[in-house]
Image: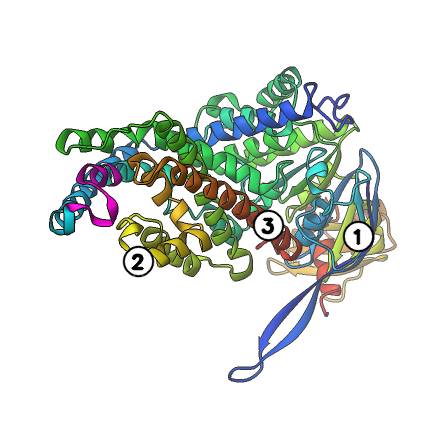
């Protein structure tokens, strides 16, 4: 190779910050394209989301019909339908399940390739995950929502800030979901095989994240404790409560602020875990 | 360019010592290696399986923390300054991939340009060169998961070079490749090394790689350096000798001796004999043989590096 330039370690001519943004953007693009490769999986996944949307929606509406004042946990029937169908659309965006890439790479030793890049692994994986979420948003979000809107009366947001707040909340939920998955996957640095922690995560994220039922159905103390003490309700319950306008404007914004706190905490934890892991890491195999 | 002083890596392994008890045992994968490699050198780093080659390479690239000792690459400490070092080195692990499984090579290369922040023109120039030298064009748009091993390895080499590294670490780059792909990789590396700018450290089990590429050979076994020098020095040190193989018209008479040689083998009912040259020259030995018996055919064998290395490995075999 021509070596004239290689002796200069700082390679970029644009500013370091803009260069970082460009790198991050390129990594987001790569995450997007990697998922865009699998079109049949996208179609099959969307179809499944819609089928389960009907099941969940009928169950919750049946609950609503028998509840006192027909408002279980403070939701109207329209709000519940919105909760279900937006939730089905967000599933693939937030990506609660099925991400074992980091754990697999640790187990196989391919993590070495990630460590040999001039990008910290946490940032690299986060960017790729944002790309994945973007692909999910463009392909998987709308179809369930449309199906829901055709067959059920949905709640239309009444406040101007609801939709922008929802957008922010979804981005934060993706980041928190990624952070949790990163930490759970990173247990493979110690355990070699992260299947146990990943199973535990899959179960708790679904139940305590607000997917199987709105957490507001639980006693208030328990709901508050979950929200404050764990990142799980920030994954789905928060964005869904924001778009359904379950609470007043102050609490609506407050829940998103809580997501910010959790996003920062979980990324800090991820960075800490990664640093610890690198110190004791043994890349497997020859 | 690369300095190692008393570099060690110990692993703790737990061995069964009863129904539930586990005894701890320390294994030294790298046991005090000191080496100094200058700019532009091409060094072959060889040793039997489990000798500590890959462990050394992992410590040099910063993915493994040494137990003790000093190491510096490009003037940087690999583990604490790993991300800075990553901009200046290229690594190919023959047994793993650094490309993106789902993406075509072209996209992987484009992504690498952003990750390493290489200006577009430099990137394009290097890629053009790799494309012509490694014949990438035919599969540039194929997703990596569909590439053959030889194609993928050419892609890996390109990926490791696009940011113009000063040091290139190659861990078994020709493993599993067919003869043609091996040749392609070797001649590419030879071309790369001839510029004298890139320092190259190569581990391999294929000694032809070394003979073709490396002036300097470092042999490691049980975590220690057992040889550091040229291939010729290795032959001299381990007494490699040439030998004469002759096909005879009549079986070799019993008790036949050829001065200055030893009889190393008699096969084909005594019709084929091998003499190893000790003190005699090849000419004298051939003349002596032809004068004594009826020789039909004759060949002179150069010492085989494989034999030398096999002898070296087994000589240092006991831990």
A282 left or right of B56 in image? left
Tell me which secondary structure the magenta stretch mostly adopts: helix
Q: Which mark is residue B259?
A: none
| Image location of residue A130, percent across then percent down | 46, 34
Q: Nearer the viewer, residue B191 or A175?
A: A175
Q: Is circle 3 on the same chain as circle 1? A: no
**Residues packed near mark 3 inside 10 Å, few (<14), some (14 to 19) or many (20 plus):** many
Q: Which mark is residue B241?
A: 1
A175 left or right of B87 in image? left
Residue to which mark 2 is pinned: A219
Q: Residue furthest top?
A: B121
Q: Residue furthest bottom?
A: B18
Query: Is residue A202 in the magenta section?
Result: no
Q: Which mark is residue A274?
A: 3
**Residues packed near mark 2 inside 10 Å, few (<14), some (14 to 19) or many (20 plus):** few
Report the span colored magenta.
Answer: A70-83
Q: What element does badge 2 sit on?
A: loop
Label 3 vs label 2, nearer the camera: 2
């Amino acid at each position: 190779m021509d070596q004239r330039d290689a002796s200069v370690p700082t390679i970029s001519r644009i500013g370091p910050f803009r260069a970082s943004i460009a790198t991050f953007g390129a990594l987001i693009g790569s995450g997007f394209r990697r998922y865009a490769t699998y079109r049949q999986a996208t179609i099959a996944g969307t179809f499944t989301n819609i089928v389960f949307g009907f099941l969940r929606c009928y169950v919750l509406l049946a609950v609503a019909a028998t509840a006192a004042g027909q408002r279980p946990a403070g939701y109207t029937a329209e709000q519940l339908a919105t909760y279900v169908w937006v939730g089905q659309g967000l599933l693939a965006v937030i990506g609660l399940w099925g991400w074992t890439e980091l754990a697999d790479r640790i187990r196989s030793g391919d993590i070495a390739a990630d460590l040999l890049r001039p990008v910290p692994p946490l940032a690299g994986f986060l960017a790729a995950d944002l790309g994945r979420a973007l692909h999910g948003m463009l392909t998987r979000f709308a179809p369930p929502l449309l199906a829901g809107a055709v067959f059920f009366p949905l709640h239309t947001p009444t406040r101007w800030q609801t939709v922008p707040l929802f957008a922010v909340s979804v981005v934060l939920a993706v980041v928190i979901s990624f952070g949790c998955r990163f930490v759970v996957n990173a247990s493979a640095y110690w355990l070699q095989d992260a299947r146990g922690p990943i199973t535990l995560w899959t179960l708790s994220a679904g139940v305590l994240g607000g997917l199987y039922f709105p957490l507001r159905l639980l006693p208030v103390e328990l709901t508050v404790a979950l929200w404050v003490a764990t990142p799980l309700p920030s994954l789905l319950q928060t964005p869904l409560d924001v778009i359904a306008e379950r609470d007043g404007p102050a609490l609506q914004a407050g829940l998103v602020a809580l997501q910010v706190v959790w996003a920062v905490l979980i990324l800090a934890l991820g960075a800490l875990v990664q640093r610890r892991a690198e110190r004791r890491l043994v890349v497997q195999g020859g | 360019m690369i300095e190692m002083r008393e570099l060690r890596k110990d692993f703790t392994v737990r061995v069964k010592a009863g129904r539930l008890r586990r005894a701890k045992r320390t294994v030294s994968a790298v046991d005090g290696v000191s080496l100094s490699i200058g700019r532009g050198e091409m060094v072959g780093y060889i040793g039997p399986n489990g000798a500590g080659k890959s462990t050394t390479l992992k410590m040099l690239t910063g993915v493994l923390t040494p137990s003790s000792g000093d190491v510096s690459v490009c003037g940087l400490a690999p583990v604490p300054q790993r991300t800075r070092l990553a901009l200046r080195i290229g690594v190919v692990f023959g047994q793993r991939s650094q490309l993106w499984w789902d993406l075509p090579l072209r996209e992987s290369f484009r992504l690498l340009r952003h990750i390493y922040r290489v200006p577009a023109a430099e990137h394009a120039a290097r890629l053009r060169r790799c494309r012509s030298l490694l014949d990438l064009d035919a599969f540039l748009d194929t997703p990596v998961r569909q590439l053959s091993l030889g194609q993928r390895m050419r892609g890996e080499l390109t990926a490791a070079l696009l940011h113009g590294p000063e040091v290139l670490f190659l861990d078994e780059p020709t493993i599993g490749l067919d003869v043609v792909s091996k040749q392609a990789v070797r001649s590419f590396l030879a071309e790369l090394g001839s510029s004298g700018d890139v320092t190259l450290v190569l581990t391999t089990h294929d000694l032809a790689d070394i003979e073709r590429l490396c002036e300097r050979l470092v042999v490691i076994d049980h975590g220690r350096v057992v040889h550091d020098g040229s291939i010729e020095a290795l032959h001299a040190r381990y007494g490699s000798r040439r030998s004469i193989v002759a096909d005879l018209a009549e079986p070799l008479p019993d008790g036949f001796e050829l001065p200055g040689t030893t009889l190393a083998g008699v096969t084909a009912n005594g019709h084929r004999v091998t003499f190893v040259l000790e003190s005699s020259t090849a000419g004298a030995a051939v003349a002596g043989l032809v004068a004594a018996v009826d020789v039909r055919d004759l060949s002179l064998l150069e010492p085989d590096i494989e034999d030398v290395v096999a002898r070296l490995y087994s000589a240092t075999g006991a831990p």
